[in-house]
Amino acid sequence: MSIKEIAGEQGQENNFLLESLEMSEKKSSPAPGKISYEPQTMLSFEEVKKLDEKYILDTYSRMPVCFAYGSGEFLYDEKGTEYIDFLSGIAVTALGHAHADLVETLLHQADLIWHSSNLFYNQQQALLARALIEISFPGKVFFANSGAEANEAAIKFIRSYGLEKNKSKIIALKNGFHGRTFGAMSVTGQKKIHDGFGPLLENITFIEPNDIKSLEAALSDDTAGLIMEPVLGEGGIIPLTREFLQKSRELCYKHKALLVFDEIQTGMGRTGNYFAWQEFNIAPDVMTLAKGLGGGFPIGAMVVAEKYKDVFHSGMHGSTFGGNHLAAAIGYEVIRLIEYHKILENVRTMGSHLMEKLWTLKDKYPDKVVEVRGKGLLVGLVLKEGIQARPLVQKALEKHLVIGRAAENVLRFAPPLILREKTMDKAFTKIEELVKEI
């Protein structure tokens, strides 16, 4: 039976097969160097919105734009309107959009092999694991597909480690965020994330960020692990202090608890070092990664220190897709490009300039701006209590600037790590307009 006949039997409502056939008949491989964007094949924004509302589960409150393609620090909608990308897909597209070397790597690897499963050895995975260890600390790597999965692995790792010592308590931070899966949600210190799902994992204690007294009171011999973001992202772009991190390291050693750093948003150069902990040289026992590691391609990882490499053994954890050839090849190329183009230096320079510019807004608009906080190119503009950030995010979009929010009153800026000064200046002009209009 032909595709047209199958589609005909399913009725007019189910016309995907017919559309697929028509697209296949029209589509041909693009000539070398030809841009993939073809306006005549694009649906209008209203058409996309209508399909989204009809067929996609309503779990997101979307902004009114549909991006068709990107280039470097910029995004473009289906009409070709240019937007400055100051969010990077929530700190994901670290090297910007359509980076030529990443595209070439993807196409080359896709032409070889995408997936074979973790039942077999994998050259791309082995090379990426070696690279991650070389830029972090001696140990071993487990690959997953996302940050939440990497954190699920870390939670299981903590529990497995603690089981041998007859302890299961996990300490996490209030306002911390570690993902939406059940385990990751359980160690996320935000009530709005917990609501609607019933009882979560037991024996989780939450403490205030940067509160050393609370840390000392909570962390004891019955603690299996402490998990935290070196810079709280969703919780409001709150950097943990050197003193708090040092005390965490000291107490975890003392009580034989695992120190776990969630570097999913901060890792891979976002703060000006490969990992946020490197600024203070306070290494964790376990580290989780995702977001920028794939430059936009889904991949996650858990890195464990050599001392704890035997906590997991064969069969205790796994992932069908984790570390597949395609994702691992791209992850390796991301690290190569960060090294080759000295991206970390750019992050430190541009991050410093951005912070300086944003602080001027506090001086000019003290009734609206409270403070600026963050590290590198993960920066939060804290607004006066009562000023909601979300409406401002939408207003920024109207000015063709893509930004985000963290907490109720914090504007989040996480531009690509390749950010240029002239692009930053353009973005800042729009940010100042935004604040001025509050």
Image (cartoon, grey):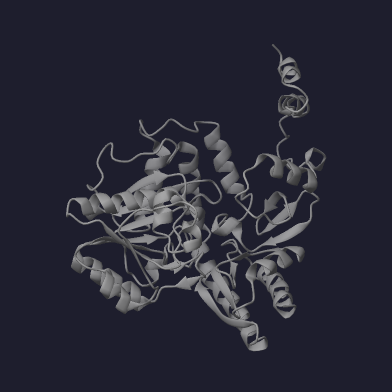
Camera-side residue of 98 and 76: 76
The image quadrant that residue 430 belongs to is bottom right
**Would you say residue 99 is visible in this rendering?**
yes
Question: Is 144 left or right of 79, judged from the image as shown?
Answer: left
Q: Position of residue 222 (x, y in %)?
A: 21, 62
Tell me where residue 72 sits by quadrant. bottom right
Relative to 168, 105 lies left or right: right
Residue 229 x, y percent position in the rendering = 41, 64
Q: Residue at x 57, y 47 (%)?
A: 102
Image-based side of 341 in relation to 174, left or right: right
Q: Looking at the image, can residue 139 be seen? A: no
**Residue at image x 49%, y 67%?**
235
- Return the residue nearer the eye: 158 or 193: 193
Image quarter hosting the C terminus: bottom right
Above or below residue 274? Residue 197 is: above
The answer to which of 359 and 103 lies nearer the viewer is 359
Percent coordinates x, y for residue 241 in the rendering: 39, 76
Image spot of residue 334 (x, y percent): 50, 51
